[in-house]
Amino acid sequence: MRRKERLLEEKDSYKILEENNFCHLAFVGEDGYPQSLPLNYLLFEGKIIFHGALEGHKARVFKEETPASITVVETNDFKPKEFTTKYKSVMAFGTVRILEGEEKDRVHKIFTEKLSENYTSQEAMDKYFDQINKYTNVYSLDIKEISGKSNIKK
């Protein structure tokens, strides 16, 4: 990073990931072109968790471990009179892999409950989860490097 004074501490970068739920996942697509996919995610045990259908673009791209990165922008406050934008953002780099078996079930249930927190009863949530889990891939971006930056004074 060129502007070292804007570098966030690692704990602050993880805090941004924890407090948000929307990112752009970047990877090289099956056609060889770079792509960025907007998606909901969950930071869980230091990993970025997301899901998708058993078939389709994500399923084809991530059928094997795949290098990828995410970007989360927490603050984007355009200040035209100051010729700047006040921002706070994080990028994380790693490898995407498909979760399977007990790990998939455990993480997918936590992710599903997080997305529908306070929305429905536990019984309805369990019934919904049982229906969708068999039709869903769950992925983990195992973070190898993380970098956050901000030009907002503390």
Image: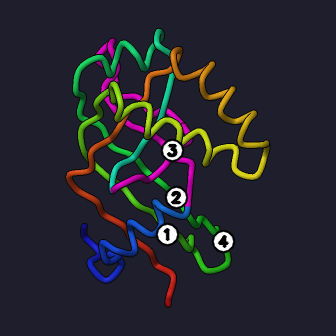
Q: CA distance from mark 4 to mark 2?
A: 19 Å
Q: Which mark is residue 41?
A: 3
Write down the residue under mark 4: 80
Q: Amino acid at mark 1?
A: Lys
Magenta stretch holds residue 141: no
For the point 58% across and 67% down, the residue is: 75
Q: Amino acid at mark 2?
A: Val
Number of other residues with Cα within 10 Å of mark 4, as a class: few under 14, some 14 to 19, many 20 or more: few
In front of the other: label 2 or label 3? 3
Q: Amino acid at mark 3?
A: Tyr
Asked if residue 125 is positioned above or below residue 5 in the image, the reply reads above
Mark found first going from the N terminus, 4 or 1:
4
> In the rendered view, does 94 fall on the left or right side of 33?
left
In front of the other: label 1 or label 3? 3
Q: Amino acid at mark 4?
A: Pro
Number of other residues with Cα within 10 Å of mark 1, as a class: few under 14, some 14 to 19, many 20 or more: many
In front of the other: label 4 or label 1? 1
Mark found first going from the N terminus, 3 or 4:
3
Magenta stretch holds residue 33: yes
> In the rendered view, does 136 fall on the left or right side of 33?
right
Write down the residue under mark 2: 73
Asked if residue 102 is positioned above or below residue 83 in the image, the reply reads above
Q: CA distance from mark 3 to mark 4?
A: 32 Å
Camera-nearest residue between 47 and 124: 124
Q: CA distance from mark 1 to mark 2?
A: 6 Å
Mark 1 residue element: strand
Give the x, y percent position of residue 125.
69, 36
Range shown magenta: 20-45
Mark 4 residue element: helix
Count of numbered labels shown in the rendering = 4
What secondary structure is the stretch in magenta mostly built from?
strand
